[in-house]
Image (cartoon, helix red, strand yellow):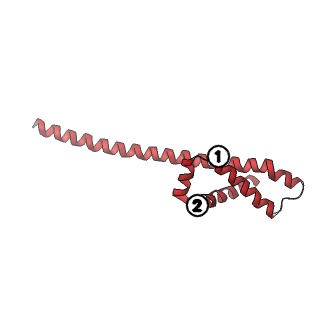
Amino acid sequence: MNELIGGIFLLAVTAVGGFAAGALRQVAAAYTENRLLAEIADAVADAVACTSQTYVDELKELGKFDEEAQKIAVTKALAACMASLSESAKDFITNNYGDIATYLTRRIEAQVKAQKL
């Protein structure tokens, strides 16, 4: 009888332990994903702000911020963003969204629009 109770107890502990381990993995994955998304958002916002201060504002004051200058600004912001992202963040983008340059360019354009509002 004691062996039966011990076996049932061991089975219950194993099942609960497996469930707890799975839940812990999910929490860790969500934390990591949130951390990477925050890093990406910060990198995009910082790159847009920096490009605006060092390139865009001066050209706008001179009345020379045309379509070609806008393309250059996006290229500069993309380069700054790529330089500041960790390899983990770059891998996350590639694995979840595909082409990193396309994804970041869209995020940069959205950030520019948000800053205008």
Residue 77 on image: x %, y %: 71, 53
Dot 1 corresponds to which residue? 84
Residue indicated by mark 2: 99
**Furthest residue toward left:** 1
Frontmost residue, 103 versus 30: 103
The residue type indicated by label 2 comes to Asp
Residue at 64 percent of width and 51 percent of height = 82
> Is residue 50 toward the left or the right of residue 62 in the image?
left
Image quadrant where one finds the N terminus: top left
Q: Is residue 92 left or right of residue 78?
A: left
User: First in sequence: mark 1 or mark 2?
Assistant: 1
Q: Residues within 10 Å of mark 2 (few under 14, many from 20)?
A: few
**Which element is circle 2 on?**
loop
Q: From this viewpoint, is residue 44 visible? A: no
Estimate how packed mark 1 is, as few (under 14), some (14 to 19) or many (20 or more) residues with alpha carbons within 10 Å.
some
Q: Amino acid at mark 1?
A: Ser
Closer to the camera, 32 or 87?
87
> Percent from the top left, x then y, of residue 92?
53, 52
Res 111 quadrant in image: bottom right
On the image, the x and y values in percent for residue 58 come to 85, 51
